Amino acid sequence: MNLLLDSLSRRLASAWRGRDPQAGPGHNYQCRCDRPVFFQNSHCLGCQSPLGYLPEAGTLTSLTPVKDSSEFTVTDAADGQRVRRCANLDSPAGCNWLVPSTDPNPLCRACRLNHTIPDLSLAENGELWRRIERPKRRLVAQLLRLGLPVTTRVEEDPEQGLMFDFLRSTPDGPRILTGHAGGLITLNIEEADDAVREKMRSDLHEPYRTLLGHLRHEVGHYYWDRLILNTPWHAPFRALFGDEQADYSAALKRHYEAGPPGDWPQRHVSAYAAAHPWEDWAETWAHYLHTVDALGTALAFGVDASDLEFQAEPFRKEDLHDPADPDAARFLELINSWVELTAVMNELARSMGQPDLYPFVLSKPAVRKLHFIHQVVSQAAGRAAATRLGIVPAP
Ligand SMILES: [Zn+2]
Ligand SMILES: [Zn+2]
Ligand SMILES: [Zn+2]
């Protein structure tokens, strides 16, 4: 079963309910000097130790340089595991991820997904790229920790892999549109400019628009192709989200011209999700990733909402896609804790005069779809683990 979801549910059971207030490390990662260090750190500000992110282990670790070499040994690794820095550390991407010293690829698991990076001869593109790579690493780390298949289409896996084009519109070329097609995610890097993104958010009447949200949404389209299309999940997908064979360009045209139907909040996680079943899937998928990540972060920092008054009626088994799912109780704990946590997050934002951090309300149909995604992810993660262990052949 899925390591990330397992550890989340263990921590939900112990920390969230307040039975064990000491549960959880209190912060995300620790340097060998015991100071808290964070996902994006490449050295400790306290003891100056080099630090790097080990994607296979899903952890940030302190490193010991190997004499007369550009390699390091991983502190605390019993077998003295040797690694080197991703070749993008000194680029504008500023990547702090590590690569096993036996891996011939100079780039880490996240950077090797890049098919096209911005033209760095234009001075401002470096900064825009840096702003994209940060949430991209967060995305890739989460996908790996969930146990989802993450391979690069660039060279490893041209059939089923994933890759990114980070592009910018030119005055005489076509306008670059953010989207996904056949394993390639294209992102218009102008979205990394806060003023441009905020203008688009406001023009499109969206309550939330972030780079991480874009990446999570687009990767949702990729996993639809990999995990739903022509699988046993395809029929239940259609029953829940609608028939994706509906004319896609006509649906988007209608959405942008006429706006969403008035009853969208009763059926979808967002207004855009009402445009087409594929968009509904990608929007709900992104919400699932937001939920698992933000809840995991809150628990890692020891947030305890047991004192909160629960304003909403908690969701129950009968609200789920499959009430008989043996994992139903765990999913309900996840989603109900999320509703509690987002109430706290929004109050914090309001007390700073900021817009709500999570400007959404989950309806029962949206929770049914989230549960469906939870089942798909859990099964895919189980299958990936079984493949790694040689129990089932690779698909
Ligand atoms: Zn340190
Ligand atoms: Zn990298
Ligand atoms: Zn989409």
Image (cartoon, rainbow, N blue to C red):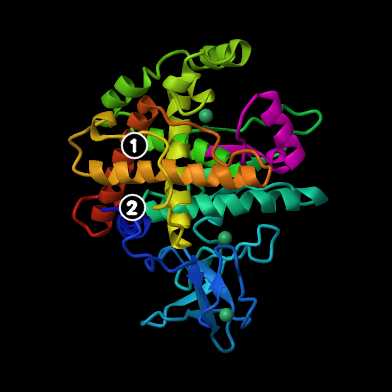
Disc 1 residue type?
Answer: Pro
Residue 389 picture quarter = bottom left
Residue 5 is marked as 2
Nearer the observer: mark 1 or 2; the answer is 1
Give the residue at the far bottom of this rendering: 67
Q: Is residue 254 above or below residue 228?
A: above
Q: Is residue 18 above or below residue 324?
A: below
Residue 9 picture quarter = bottom left
C-alpha distance separating marks 1 and 2 = 20 Å
194 relative to 15 in the view: left or right? right
Question: Dot 1 lies on which element?
Answer: loop
Q: Which residues are magenta?
A: 183-210
Quick one: label 2, few (<14), some, or many (20+) residues within 10 Å? many
Q: Position of residue 294 (x, y in %)?
A: 48, 50
Magenta segment: does it hold 191?
Answer: yes
Q: Position of residue 299 (x, y in %)?
A: 43, 58
Question: Dot 2 lies on which element?
Answer: helix
Disc 2 residue type?
Answer: Leu
Image quarter in which the C terminus is found: top left
Quick one: label 1, few (<14), some, or many (20+) residues within 10 Å? some
The residue shown at (64%, 38%) is 355
Q: Which residue is mark 1?
A: 314
Q: Position of residue 268 (x, y in %)?
A: 44, 24
| Residue 214 in sight in this render | yes
The residue shown at (30%, 43%) is 331
225 relative to 215 in the view: left or right? left
The residue shown at (34%, 55%) is 17
